[in-house]
Image: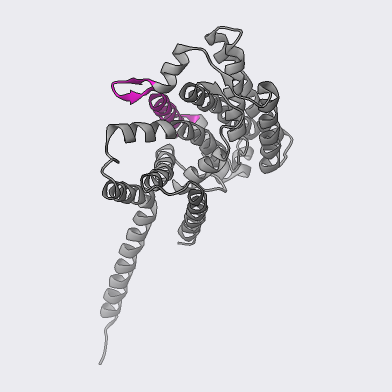
Amino acid sequence: MNHSAGDDLKLQGGLRGKFTGQERASELFKKYIALVVLLLLIIISSTISDAFFTQKNLSNLLRQLSGTTIVSMGMLLVILTGGIDLSVGSVVALSGVLFAYFATFTSLPVALLLTFFFAALCGMISGYFSAFQNMAPFVVTLAMMSAARGIAYIVSRGTPIPIQSRAVSIFGQGSLYSIPFPVITALLVFVVIAFLLRYTSFGRFVQAIGSNETAVRLSGIRVNYYKWMVYTISGFLCAFAGIISDGRTGVGSPTIGSGMEMDAIAACVIGGASLSGGRGTAINTLVGVLILGLIGNIMNLMNVAGYPQQVIKGIIIIVAVLLQGSRKKN
């Protein structure tokens, strides 16, 4: 049976169109997989327990995730440049301890200013050695993680420092129109970071550095300065999380924030951020935080111990990285 050239072209065009459609569907699935997973978890949660959609449960869940959300936004900026910040959990603990300590002998505004300054200073130090001394971010922030936690224990003498302030308690435990103040704070931080990344030259430069640092450097942009800035911002944001923890618990404890760096990294990766830099968004990172929070909430509603959550979190990170790898190959 003879085939004309026209028939061959039609066949090739049909196959090309079919594969293009499949590729588009695959790309869309990978692009929105985090959102799909989030919706599935919401459905599962509502099915498992009638208590999930109660105002008390949702309020507690969002309040618990507020600190992680804020820290994850700072982590996203660092990851976008191709870096990593392992010190965030310890800086959160140090911030909480310092705020409680300063509040014992100074006014709240002064305590706030000092806390934010020292938290940002931790980020500035990490950023300086990573950006200007070309030291590996993993090593630098690992050292800062140890140092910040150690200072927190020294300042607190190993015991929680109570906070005798009604304003701090209201901030940590109160709400506005049924929306907890920590959640409002986290949403404001999210909006600011999302705006920076989407509408400012700072955000474009940060993403460009992660995509092709050499090209950005050759174009005359101060790469080291922007790298230093993202670590500073990450440290600054940790102060919010530390103060929120103080408000919720009523004490500044050197033990808080343990493992928070893993939560923040996991949230970014689940949200599609590339650990090699250059790709990631604030909204997807927020979705990643919610996914981690819902997994923990489901287990709590099912009366499952907290330890398996760490195992599941590790598996999720591996799966997310594997999905990123398959996206790059395609």
Q: Closer to the camera, 122 or 224?
A: 122
Question: Which span of residues is magenta-colored?
Answer: 174-201
Q: Nearer the viewer, residue 17 or 67?
A: 67
Number of numbered labels in the structure image? 0
Let me know if residue 221 appears in the view.
no
Magenta-drawn stretch contains 325: no
Query: Where residue 145 appears, x then y in whole percent?
Result: 66, 35
For image coordinates 43% across by 49% down, the residue present is 304
Residue toward you, 296 or 207: 296
User: In the image, what residue occupies the spot 26% across and 79% down?
Assistant: 7
Query: Eyeballing the image, is 295 above or below 154?
Result: below
**As displayed, is residue 309 above or below residue 163?**
below
Magenta span dominant secondary structure: helix
Residue 200 shown in magenta: yes
Residue displayed at 32% across by 59% down: 25
> Which quadrant is home to the C terminus?
bottom left
Residue 28 visible in the picture: yes
Would you say 86 lies left or right of 297 here? right
Question: In which image quadrant can residue 63 be found?
Answer: top left
The picture places residue 312, in percent across and down from the top left corner, at: 48, 53
Residue 153, image x, y percentages: 67, 27
Residue 258 image point, x, y percent: 58, 37
Viewer-side residue, 182 vs 105: 105
Identify whether 193 is placed above or below 278. above
